[in-house]
Image (cartoon, helix red, strand yellow):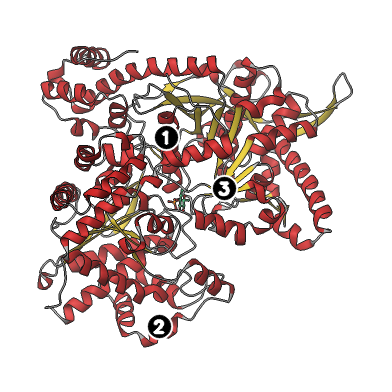
């Protein structure tokens, strides 16, 4: 196994600087050193990558294909250095060169191929799969532009394209020889083969060449390297003489355009996809390419296609890749000539589905017309899957039209992709206990009643390697100095930290580390257009995608309330607090963007009001993403997890904060419930309606927020100020819609459908308790340490072991 010593690394960096840029170390820019260092690290990875492959092949292990439209990777260089345990060597060499690793890391683009939790979960899962020694391939799309870069101008979000590939990405490898063709459109001709069997042939189609780019996923210290395979599209039909001869010029142009458009952009996950043909093209494109490749690879070493489920499992990350079910059927029927029964048996033993949200916007539905034109053969197959499934329903439920209405795959002119995924899978899982419960009892109740054994829960997790070892080196050393370093690969070991929770020296040291991390974040904020903030204040943080159900609005309304109280009573007893936000709103989500503007306007007023003596500050961190998230989690005292109960399937930010010793202020939603269970509810600040209460209101037409508005003068005052220009004399029109959404129903949306006013007082009270608790530094330090000590359950290593045991059945490989 290749390891690098200091001299070899130095030599390698020098060589790459020469080859790539014709430069000496002393002349090279930081970007050039970043590239040269990354290539040097990649050299080490390549050897491990090859030997991992060899071992997987020799042992003929089963592989999970994790199909996901999103992988929110974060930067690779630092993480790879840590996983290869090369940090000391790298630091020594860079010191010689006179540059810091952190500065070099800053040169790396943050591949933002995802929106939020779902994509980041996929990245954590790959990290765990490699570290635990399981064979896995992540399958996704190589978007040219991932998530946009967010710039805040005059308080408004502006979206700027993020051209992450502009300087080349050193860790990727193009694998031209593994390309496959993906077909769209045309029609299906039915003929008979020589044995008289019906054959379905797609004709007059457009096609693209799917070209894989492989990224290494390096296991921690175990020499295992798995692959994330992201697909790019190239035109099949170059402008060759052939096409001109046939008068096919138009088609050649179309194919070029098709290839160019498919991988261009990442869609926001809260947009309504209906009618967005390009989104469906993306889905089929990467699914078809991935499944074709997986089957080809299996057939290289095996003879019997019937045994595919023994060696391959396809995990569909949410509804987006659910066309997998039909694509696998197509390959088995059309390419391998299996009977329907044989093909269905194989498909339903290879496919598994994870549901990540009950928000209806994510349960994709496609109009039949659009779908059947784009994917004529796939549509035929879905029709047949649906026909057979409806026959089962009819037999089992006496043709009950209610059951058909809820469960049919094709209904009301639409194809319901979640239903396809459920019917075609042997496993359906939710991502936290509460969420899985809601799926069983509400959302997917009929499916659960029909096939209860398919349903299971897999509470999400996060990788402690990125979010503690890499993101918070001070706290990592604190932990390791006390309990050793086993926690890096087995987070349950954190439990041993519990005995230090009451130790005054550990408490002081913990608070000092938190302070240092707050200083680091304060400097970052200042450097990135933010205000000056006091590291002695409570850092109260809410960072996540902006969505009404996540209730950033509730948070900022509490800030407005606190400010107004403080104005009325300047001597009010208050512990200085910095409210920190970070969030991107999808470009078309106007209300979410108005909430960002509101946060910034409120911040402007408060941060510039000398009369309150810096007691509260509001910061909106521009362009929240994985790389600054690592720093933010490390610096947080309070973790805001305040979604409307029942709406946040799990949350994973909540776990990252806990791991870094922040205390949860949250509703009993998603994985917050399990966090409270693990650390003890007395060591969290829980407030608000429960999921049952929310669901009860929803089933009975909601509640009347006007009553609260009329009687609660605090609420009334902040709401009036919102629209009267108190926080923004020029742009306050932007807030009228927010105000209306809280008081009036509009079309299908009930007034205050996320129960912000309903939970307001309970939130204010919880916030008051936070402040009281913080006054007792020793209690706070003890509780923070207890949070770290009890986060063992929330490692993605635990989640992956559960997937492996219950769903994937993979073998562990050691090298
Ligand atoms: C979603 C859910 C989260 C969940 C995550 C991963 C879609 O992510 O809403 O509750 O933790 O998937 O399962 P997000 O909202 O963060 O984009």
Q: Give the residue at mark 1.
A: 128
Residue 182 occupies quadrant: top right
Q: Is mark 3 within 8 Å of ligand 1?
A: no
Q: Residues under labels 3 and 2: Cα distance?
A: 38 Å
Q: Position of residue 403 (x, y in %)?
A: 74, 59
In the rendered image, residue 790, in percent from the top left (x then y), is placed at 34, 50
Q: Mark 2 sits on what residue?
A: 708
Vertical order, 311 against 690 (above or below): above
In the image, residue 749 above or below residue 321:
below
In percent of the image, x 68 and y 31: which residue is there?
205
Question: In the image, what residue occupies the spot 39% across and 17% down?
Answer: 48
- Per the image, label 1 sits on a secondary structure element best described as helix
Quarter in which the N terminus is drawn:
top left
Q: Hey, which quadrant is residue 183 in on the image? A: top right
Q: Which mark is residue 622?
A: none
Q: Is residue 729 left or right of residue 149?
A: left
Q: Is residue 75 left or right of residue 335?
A: left
Task: Specify few, some or many for label 2: CA neighbours under 10 Å numbering under 14, 14-19, or 20 or more.
Answer: some
Residue beneath the point at 59% across and 25% down: 294
Q: Which mark is residue 429?
A: 3
Q: Secondary structure at mark 2?
A: helix
């Amino acid at each position: 196994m290749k390891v690098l010593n200091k001299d070899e690394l130095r030599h390698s960096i020098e060589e790459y600087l020469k080859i790539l840029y014709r430069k000496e170390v002393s002349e090279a820019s930081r970007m050039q050193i970043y590239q040269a260092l990354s290539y040097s690290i990649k050299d080490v990875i390549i050897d491990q990558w090859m030997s991992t492959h060899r071992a997987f092949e020799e042992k003929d292990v089963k592989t999970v294909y994790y199909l996901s439209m999103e992988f929110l990777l974060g930067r690779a260089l630092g993480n790879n250095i840590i996983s290869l345990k090369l940090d000391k060597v790298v630091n020594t060499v860079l010191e010689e060169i006179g540059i810091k690793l952190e500065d070099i890391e800053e040169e790396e683009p943050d591949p933002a191929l995802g929106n939020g939790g779902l994509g980041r979960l996929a990245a954590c899962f790959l990290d765990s799969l490699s570290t635990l020694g399981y064979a896995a391939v992540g399958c996704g799309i190589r978007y040219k532009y991932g998530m946009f870069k967010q710039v805040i101008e005059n308080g408004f979000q502006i979206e700027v394209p993020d051209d992450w590939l502009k300087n080349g990405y050193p860790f990727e490898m193009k694998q031209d020889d593994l390309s496959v063709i993906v077909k769209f459109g045309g029609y299906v001709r039915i003929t008979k083969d020589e044995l008289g069997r019906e054959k379905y042939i797609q004709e007059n189609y457009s096609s693209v060449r799917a070209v894989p780019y492989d990224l290494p996923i390096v296991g921690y210290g175990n020499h295992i390297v798995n692959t994330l395979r992201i697909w790019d599209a190239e035109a099949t039909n170059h402008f060759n003489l052939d096409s001109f001869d046939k008068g096919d010029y138009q088609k050649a142009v179309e194919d070029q355009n098709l290839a160019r458009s498919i991988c261009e952009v990442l869609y926001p996950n809260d947009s309504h996809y209906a009618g967005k043909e390009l989104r469906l093209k993306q889905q089929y494109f990467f699914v078809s390419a991935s499944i074709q490749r997986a089957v080809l690879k299996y057939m290289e070493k095996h003879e019997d296609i019937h045994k595919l489920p023994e060696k391959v499992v396809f995990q569909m990350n949410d509804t987006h890749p659910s066309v997998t079910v039909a694509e696998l059927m197509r390959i088995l029927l059309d390419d391998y000539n299996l009977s329907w029964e044989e093909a269905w048996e194989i498909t339903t033993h290879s496919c598994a589905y994870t549901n990540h949200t009950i928000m209806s916007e994510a349960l994709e539905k496609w109009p039949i017309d659009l779908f059947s034109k784009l994917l004529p053969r796939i549509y035929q197959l879905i029709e047949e899957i649906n026909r057979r499934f409806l026959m089962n329903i009819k037999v089992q439920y006496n043709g009950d039209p209610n059951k058909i209405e809820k469960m049919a795959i094709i209904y009301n002119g639409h194809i319901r992709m979640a239903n396809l995924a459920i019917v075609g899978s042997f496993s359906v899982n939710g991502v936290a206990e509460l969420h899985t419960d809601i799926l069983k009892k509400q959302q997917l109740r009929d499916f659960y009643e029909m096939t209860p054994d398919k349903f299971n829960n897999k509470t999400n997790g996060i990788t402690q390697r990125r979010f503690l070892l890499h993101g918070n080196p001070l706290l990592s050393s604190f932990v390791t100095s006390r309990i050793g370093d086993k926690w890096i690969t087995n987070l349950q070991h954190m439990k041993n930290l519990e005995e230090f929770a009451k130790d005054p020296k550990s408490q002081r040291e913990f608070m000092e580390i938190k302070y240092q991390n707050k200083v680091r974040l304060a400097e970052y904020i200042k450097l990135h257009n933010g205000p000056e903030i006091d590291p002695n204040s409570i850092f109260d943080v809410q960072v996540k995608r902006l969505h009404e159900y996540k209730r950033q609005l509730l948070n900022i309304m509490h800030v407005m309330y606190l400010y107004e109280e403080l104005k009325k009573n300047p001597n009010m007893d208050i512990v200085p607090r910095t409210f920190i936000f970070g969030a991107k709103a999808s470009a078309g989500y106007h209300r979410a963007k108005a909430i960002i503007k509101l946060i910034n306007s409120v911040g402007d007023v408060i941060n510039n009001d000398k009369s309150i003596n810096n007691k509260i500050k509001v910061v909106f961190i521009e362009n929240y993403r994985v790389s600054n998230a690592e720093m933010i989690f490390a610096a947080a005292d309070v973790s805001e997890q305040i979604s409307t109960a029942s709406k946040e399937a799990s949350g994973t930010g909540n776990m990252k904060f806990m791991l870094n010793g922040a205390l949860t202020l949250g509703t009993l939603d998603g994985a917050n419930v399990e966090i409270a269970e693990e650390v003890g509810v007395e060591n969290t600040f829980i407030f608000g309606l429960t999921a049952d209460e929310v669901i009860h209101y929803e089933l009975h037409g909601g509640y009347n927020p006007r009553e609260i508005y009329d009687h609660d003068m605090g609420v009334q005052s902040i709401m009036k100020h919102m629209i009267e220009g108190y926080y923004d004399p020029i742009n306050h029109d932007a807030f009228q819609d927010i105000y209306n959404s809280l008081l009036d129903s509009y079309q299908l949306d009930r007034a205050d459908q996320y129960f912000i006013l309903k939970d307001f007082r309970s939130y204010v009270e919880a916030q008051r308790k936070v402040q009281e608790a913080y006054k007792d530094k020793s209690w706070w330090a003890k509780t923070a340490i207890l949070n770290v000590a009890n986060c063992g359950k929330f490692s993605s290593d635990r989640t992956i072991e559960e997937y492996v045991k219950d769903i994937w059945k993979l073998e562990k490989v050691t090298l």
